[in-house]
Each structure stands twice: as structure tokens, then as C-alpha cells.
Amino acid sequence: MIIHSASFIGSSTTIEQCPEPVKPEFAFIGRSNVGKSTLINMLTGFTRLAKISGNPGKTRTINHFLINEAWFLVDLPGYGYAKVSSGMREKWVKSAEHYILKRENLACLFVLLDSRHEPQKSDLAFMEFLGINQVPFARVFTKTDKISVNAIEKTINNHNNEMLKVWDSLPPAFISSSVKRTGREEILSFIEETIKNFSNG
């Protein structure tokens, strides 16, 4: 897939404020500071599309971007650490959760996982929540330029082994590096194929 255009449509705090659900959507979510905004910018080729911050918890709303006038890329609030009150953090989580469960045109949710870390309980619990609710998702292991190929393989195997304790089969997985642009073509091809299946469905 070639990205010809990408434009910011708007920010929403509730699903009711989101654009009309007439185009397939691909949302991105992960723990704070996992590299979500950087990945979005790398995928689209527009370096300032999603705002990047050194402070975890920058994304606080549901942000829609229209890609190629054909589908929406959605930047969701991260879960986990952020320098805000627990009440505010809970509000973000509820907003994202409601979107994930109720958004009828959500074709796939990309769950970002930091490749440098062992499987985190919050990530595993979140993916189990997605599985229980039959939300289609794929995993993206980020920041792979910071570790060796062997370490990446070990990380993915550890995640797979943990998930297979409760899963019968595993969701798709991609490795990415915004520095080396690793995974860009694979993820965009996956999106393109999913759009075809989504439209035919």
C-alpha cells in the first residue's frame, strides 16, 4: 500500500463524537511510552501526523486520521503509567474500552508491545480481554532496533508461550522499528488485505 494522503480529522472523548462509521478503521493502542505516535508517523510517512512526547500519557483522546480518503487510522489513549490522577487515567481507559467494544467499523486493533521487555501482566490481561470480546487484533513489537535479532526472537517466543497458556491460537505479530522503518510494508500490506476482506464481508 502506498500512502498518498493523511489528514487529521478530529479528537473525540466519546464514541458518539467519532466520525460516521462508514469507512474501515485501524486503531493503535499500547502501554504509555511504547512508541505509538512514532510508529503511526513511520507508517504514514508523515513525520508530524501524530504528536510525539517524551512524557508518557500524551494521547488523551480518540484521534482520527483519514488515510488515502479510504480508511481511518485511530490513535487511542495508552494504558498504564501516566503523570495524571488515577481518576483521569480511568476516564481514558473507559473511553478507549467503549470505543473498542462498540465501534462497528473497527477492522483491526494493533496492540503495541515494547520488544525490550518481558511479557507484562497489563498487556496479557488486555489482550485476553480482547479475545473474550472477540475484538480482532494484531501485535506489533516496537523498538526492535534497540536489541539484537536473537533478543527479538526470545521476546516474541516468551510472549507466545505466555499467551498459549490461555489461547488456542495466536493473533498475528509484526516487528517494527521506526528508526529502521522495519515492519512498515508488512503492516500496510496487512491493512490493505484486511480492508478487502472487511469490504467483502
Image (cartoon, grey):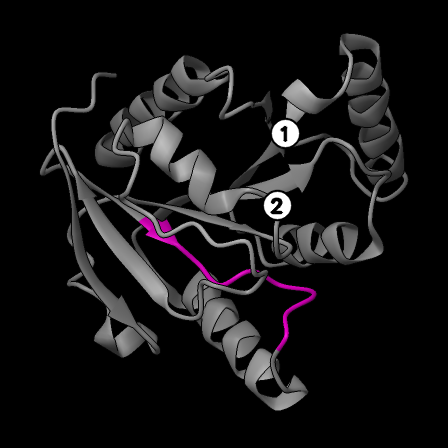
Query: What span is in magenta?
Result: 74-83
144 relative to 57, above or below: above
The residue most toward the left is: 69
> Mostly what secondary structure, the magenta segment?
loop
> Where is residue 42 shown, x and y percent of the image?
38, 28
Point 67% across, 85% down: residue: 86
User: Closer to the camera, 50 or 92?
Assistant: 50
Answer with the quarter of the image where residue 38 lies.
top left
Q: Quadrant of the N terminus?
A: top left
Q: Is residue 82 magenta?
A: yes
Q: Quadrant of the C terminus?
A: top left
Which amino acid type corresponds to the residue marked 2 in the rendered image?
A: Val
Q: Secondary structure at mark 2?
A: loop
Look at mark 2 in the image and give the residue it sits on: 34
The number of discs equals: 2
Q: Is residue 134 left or right of residue 27?
A: right
**Residue type of the residue flagged with mark 1:** Lys
According to the image, label 1 marks what residue? 143
Residue most extreme to the top: 149
